[in-house]
Amino acid sequence: MDKKRVAINMTAQLLAFAVNMLLGFILVPIIDSMIPNSYGFTDIANKFVQAAQIVVSALNTMASRFITIQIHRDDKEEANQYFSSVFFANVLMAVVFMVPAMFVVVYLGHIFQIPSEASLPDIQMLFFFIFVNFLISITTSVFGVAPYSQDRLELSSIAAILGEVARLTVLFVSYLFFRPYLWYVGCASVASTLIQAAANLIFTRRLLPDMKVKRKYFRWAKVKELVSLGAWNSVTRLGQLLLSGLDTSIANIMINAAAMTTVSISSQVPTVIVNLMGTIAGVFNPQMTIAYAKEDKKQLLEIIGSADRIMIFLISIPIAFLIIFGKAFFTLWIGKTQNPDQLYVLALLNIGTMCVSASIQVLYHVFLITKRVKLNSVVILSCGILTTTTVFVLLETTSLGVYAIVGTSTVFGILRNLVFTPIYAARCLKVKWYTFYGDIILGLISIGAICLTAFPFQLFIKIDGWFKLFGVGIAAGMLALAVNFLIVLRRNERKMVLDMVKKKLPH
């Protein structure tokens, strides 16, 4: 494993992630105060996009794998055929999706409950821009393969940061100088995606000068090959949507718009952690794919082992901090317009699955590179159907309300990640069935140890301001890193970290 490349990619990806996260946390309370009970519609609009991505993912989830493998096997003709076929197929799908997208925009008021404080045209414009953003993103998605195929994810991060700067500029100008509308969020997303697409196009020309989008390279057979295998990823996406993606929509339809916004806001911090998990895991995906392409099983297992420990080292801290300091955070962040106690409980329900899945996140990529996605897809879909069915039953027969909506997916998520994911990944890699359970146990130990480390801060210090929260967070964070340094990292990894620190210190 190229540790230097991992470090560069990790740093760049985390920086891009931090910019996106900071923007989100600033934006949510501002919009919720200006346009009450409406922010949840941004989440619902994005869930419509996720539903559309179920179809799109059948083609695109496997594109990076096939193109990368052909490039590293030095088969430029085959790589070009996949590259061009994916591009033209995406353009065709974008045209097709325009019709249902416009239908949703026009009849939005008949589908959802619109609160009296909100404007229907405003929400329709929000949906319009988010749908346009989706169409642009799928049309240009193939150009994101270049940094991935060359293990240069720091370039993807640069594109993402430029996009977030564009998003921030649009939002800042719009909300500062004009009357507040929700559709500014969608417009900013379009600006961000256009900037990222332009950057990825430049990277493609520099990293993959032999990759050209040409009609002569288009092959329906390549599209069919990608879709036939990628269709199971669409099933996975559908299962994921049923697991938790419908939370805000169900809350709006079955309860009211206020419940929708509460569910949406409560998921903001857990969503940040989920995205952070995906960011870290994604750093290792190119090297895993390249190792598999070279049929180097030893290297592949080494990458997975390091990825699991790095994931635990980083992710257990925000999970534990949400458990200990979450109530104080919600009180300071959005306590003026929402019930912080309710948000805190819902957030805890949201992170339940992560306590198990965080330490084995990279295993999902094993199913993709080994082309063993079918059974995983069926299991996720089954859990999704059971989750949605159970939620409707609980809403009709109990008074649990939003807690039923959020908590049910956590129960099924924990069961799936304990009983199925580690065992099936071990089978795909032809190693012992219990190989990855040690990482799950290590992750739980790490979270528990950090909770014990941070709890005295919460117990003896009254956190009644942002300064105190950040101060306590920094102090507890340094202790948490020390705890994870001793618990999670192996001797050679600890030595590597210490050597890196020593090099940075002045002699």
Image (tube, rainbow, N blue to C red):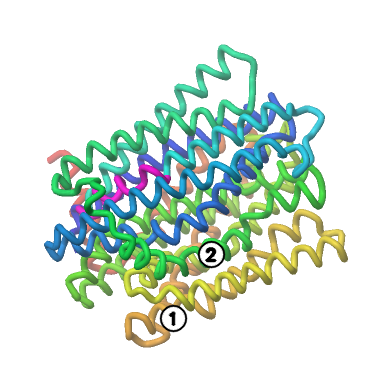
- Element type where label 2 sits in the image: helix
* Above or below for 377 versus 173: below
Q: Position of residue 106 (x, y in %)?
A: 68, 36
Please name the residue that numbered disc 1 is placed on: 424
Q: Is residue 156 magenta?
A: no
Please name the residue that numbered disc 2 is placed on: 355
* Above or below for 23 versus 174: below
Q: Position of residue 394 (x, y in %)?
A: 81, 65
- Element type where label 1 sits in the image: helix
Residue type (three-letter) at the residue carrying disc 1: Tyr
Q: Residues within 10 Å of mark 1 (few under 14, many from 20)?
A: some
Q: Position of residue 188 (x, y in %)?
A: 49, 29
Q: Is residue 346 visible?
A: yes
Which of 195 and 479 lies nearest the eye of the viewer? 195
Q: 440 left or right of 110?
A: left
Give the magenta range: 138-150
